[in-house]
Image (cartoon, rainbow, N blue to C red):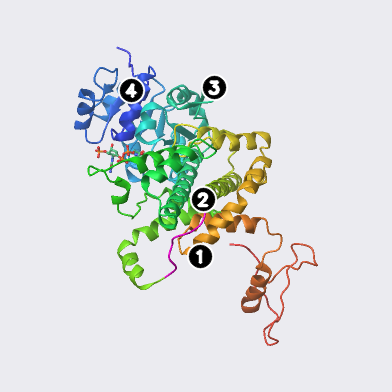
Amino acid sequence: MQPQGDIALIGLAVMGQNLILNMNDHGFTVVAYNRTVSKVDDFLANEAKGTRVVGAHSIPELVAALKKPRRVMLMVKAGAPVDEFIDQLLPHLEAGDIVIDGGNSLFTDTNRRVASLAARGIHFIGTGVSGGEEGARRGPSIMPGGSSAAWPHVKPIFQGIAAKVEGGAPCCDWVGEGGAGHYVKMIHNGIEYGDMQLIGEAYHLMRDALGMTADEMHAVFSAWNEGELDSFLVEITRDILKFKDTDGQPLVDKILDTAGQKGTGKWTVVNAAELAQPVTLIAEAVFSRCVSAMKEERVKAARKLKGPRPAIRGDRAKFVEDIRYALYASKIVSYAQGYMLLRAAAAEYRWNLNYGGIALMWRGGCIIRSRFLIRIKEAYDGNPKLANLLLDDYFRGEIKKCQKGWRNVVSMAAKKGIPVPAFSTALSFFDGYRTARLPANLLQAQRDYFGAHTYERIDQPRGQFFHTNWTGHGGRVSSSTYNA
Ligand code: NBP
């Protein structure tokens, strides 16, 4: 009998199982396999019962069940498990076959895997998959990159199962060579950290400065979700605030305030530093999770370090509206920073990224999906060379509307001692970006004073470097001029 399998999927945890069922719904025959093989039969007997999913109990059995070119997708823990499965698969694959890694792998690992498998004639795709359990089952956002020759063989499956938006457009398209797909997923996750931190700061101000109850905040988030902040994360925040524990009290109030993280936010910040891009909001979001994790230390510090009382008097409804402005403006800055990093990465790694297309891929199916992303798509479709989202006419106008309220929130939070690191870094970045003359002249003077690092002058052409003997007893030799 001819092999029937359209694609194999290895890794029967939450993402793998749901992707398999989604592929099955779209008419594809999936071969399922897992390191702990007992989970294959368990899956076939339960979730996959009555479907056309085929179980495999070994790698040779999996490979034998696949049509050619063979397509094998890994949905396993990122890191060594991906390399271990590749090593197990390779002896059974032939030139033209395709291996896909759908986990949250570091893009540099994907670069390496694309190159090493290409040397053996095997195509490798590294793809971001976002949307969690529900997305995987009903339509995720899928961000594939790697060996472009493999894309036509994978496209019908991926675009078939992906979320659809605006007239049926799939939230999946080819991102680029090497690790480009995983890179875009990494930026997605970084932006997700930022969005969550911003919502958290809005919640903190409403709870501690205005003394609002969970039900009152639920009403605010419900209203916000009807406007330009309409998004998955605002929607689930609305629902979380409404959710009651068994005793009728809001469950959110009983959850310990220490945030976890799995690394993709940190990777974004490390890469931003490597590429000298000021992605300050995601950095604050990552570090805010670190501060939250210092729970015992914070509890002790709270007894010793006194500040102002957080309560704000005055027009509450107006302050809630100002918080909405702060959230919206900061979100625009965060996406502007994320896109700055994408542009720098495209130049550094020689990827031809479609910025509007990326916004469309994030438009549905994923955690950062929102109405707002269509505006980003329009901005880049209108001007693919747009230097910064903040310079787009639409976003310039939106920031203008928000500015007064945004500044009021940041200054009020400072006066009342409520931390708003993401709101304030967004505002500081905005002010820095729009400042023609920063104080870095003094900084350059300091560098030249203590280390003979040289400086450029405003009355001389760029690229000419000067050194001054500031103390009268320094030498004539200056340091080399370069940027690390
Ligand atoms: P997990 O990240 O929990 O991974 C579970 C799978 O990895 C199981 O099949 C497990 O096999 C296998 N595995 C592990 Br753990 N260690 C292994 C090893 N040393 N060698 C071989 N296999 C190993 O599952 P998930 O949450 O479904 O995520 C799968 C991938 O998708 C991850 O890379 C994750 O980062 C990514 N992702 C997750 C989400 C989400 O919302 N959960 C969203 C988007 C992307 P076993 O059954 O034998 O232990």
Q: Residue at x 66, y 44 (%)?
A: 397
Amino acid type, mark 4: Val
The mark nearer the N terminus, 2 or 3, is 3
The mark nearer the N terminus, 3 or 1, is 3
User: Dominant secondary structure of the magenta stretch?
Assistant: loop
- Looking at this rendering, what residue extends furthest in the front direction? 314
The label nearer to you, 2 versus 3, is 2
Viewer-nearest residue: 130 or 424 = 424
| Residue 313 visible in image | yes
Could you give the CA–CA distance between mark 2 and mark 1, rounded to whole angstroms?
15 Å
* Residue carrying label 2: 323
* Mark 2: secondary structure: helix
- Looking at this rendering, what residue extends furthest in the top direction? 1
The label nearer to you, 2 versus 4, is 2
Splitting the image into four quadrants, where does ligand 1 fall?
Answer: top left
* Mark 3: secondary structure: loop
The mark nearer the N terminus, 2 or 1, is 2
Image: magenta residue range: 307-319
* Residue carrying label 1: 415
The label nearer to you, 3 versus 4, is 3
Q: Is residue 393 left or right of residue 164?
A: right
* Residue carrying label 3: 167
Displayed quadrant of residue 26: top left
Please say if the residues under marks 3 and 4 sit with CB atoms less than 8 Å apart: no
Could you give the CA–CA distance between mark 3 and mark 1, rounded to whole angstroms?
48 Å
Residue 123: image x %, image y %?
A: 45, 32
The mark nearer the N terminus, 2 or 4, is 4
Residue 308: image x %, image y %?
A: 44, 68
Query: Residue 133: within the magenta?
Result: no
- Quadrant where the N terminus is found in the figure: top left
Label placed on residue 30: 4
